[in-house]
Amino acid sequence: MISLDLELKLLTLEHLSALLELDQACFGGLWTMDAYQRELDSPNSDLLGLFSPLSNSRLLGMGCFWSILEEAHITILAVHPQYHRQGLGQALLYSLINTACDRGLERATLEVRASNSAAISLYQKFGFKTAGRRRRYYQDNGEDALILWICDLQEPQFQATLKNWYTLVCDRLSKSSWQLIF
């Protein structure tokens, strides 16, 4: 079986149009060009992208978090609809958490639509626990958001957890003929 390479990169201003295209495909235009530009310019924001060199270096997925004190606030995690259920979301989430650990952050949080069972399942697989609910959080339809947290990112045993997740991610990707390269 042939594996297709997936490349993880820190996104830059040169990726701005690809970010907008992916945002449109995933969210119908959630963030504006100015919003992405602010993320790219901010020293407190990490914006990661997954690319496939075989598809003209197309941006297949993206993830972003803000560093706020000792927390990583995950603001976006998106995979192009054509590539759902192939392990790319797992690869991005692992990469965001790993980057947060490298930055010395102690915990991570995010909000997710209460109805998004696929995303909730992914987050739970990576140790996130529900800590609360934001009523009518989403402006488009008034849906609630669940607030999820994972803690202890700097504890010594968490490094073993990261290694296990890396193996899990690589195994899942290989089932869809992908191979993650850094």
Image (tube, rainbow, N blue to C red):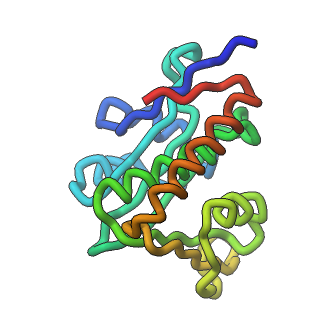
State the count of labels: 0
**Is residue 134 visible in the rendered structure shown here?**
no
Give whichever of 99, 112 is nearer the camera.
99
Q: Quadrant of residue 129?
A: bottom right
Give whichever of 165, 45 is nearer the camera.
165
Residue 178 picture location, percent across and down: 65, 25
**Is residue 146 visible in the rendered structure shown here?**
yes
Q: Could you tell whether 182 is left or right of 50 in the image?
A: left
Q: In which quarter of the image is residue 143?
A: bottom right
Determine whether 55 is above or below 101 in the image: above
Give whichever of 102, 90 is nearer the camera.
102
Q: Residue at x 36, y 38 (%)?
A: 11
Determine whether 1 is above or below 11 in the image: above
Residue 13 picture location, percent across and down: 29, 36
Give whichever of 149, 115 is nearer the camera.
149
Q: Which residue is drawn at 68% across and 66% down?
A: 124
Residue 157 picture location, percent across and down: 47, 65
- Quadrant, the N terminus: top right
Q: Residue at x 78, y 64 (%)?
A: 117
- Quadrant, the C terminus: top left
Residue 37 picture location, percent across and down: 31, 47
Q: Quadrant of residue 108?
A: bottom left
Determine whether 38 is above or below 178 in the image: below
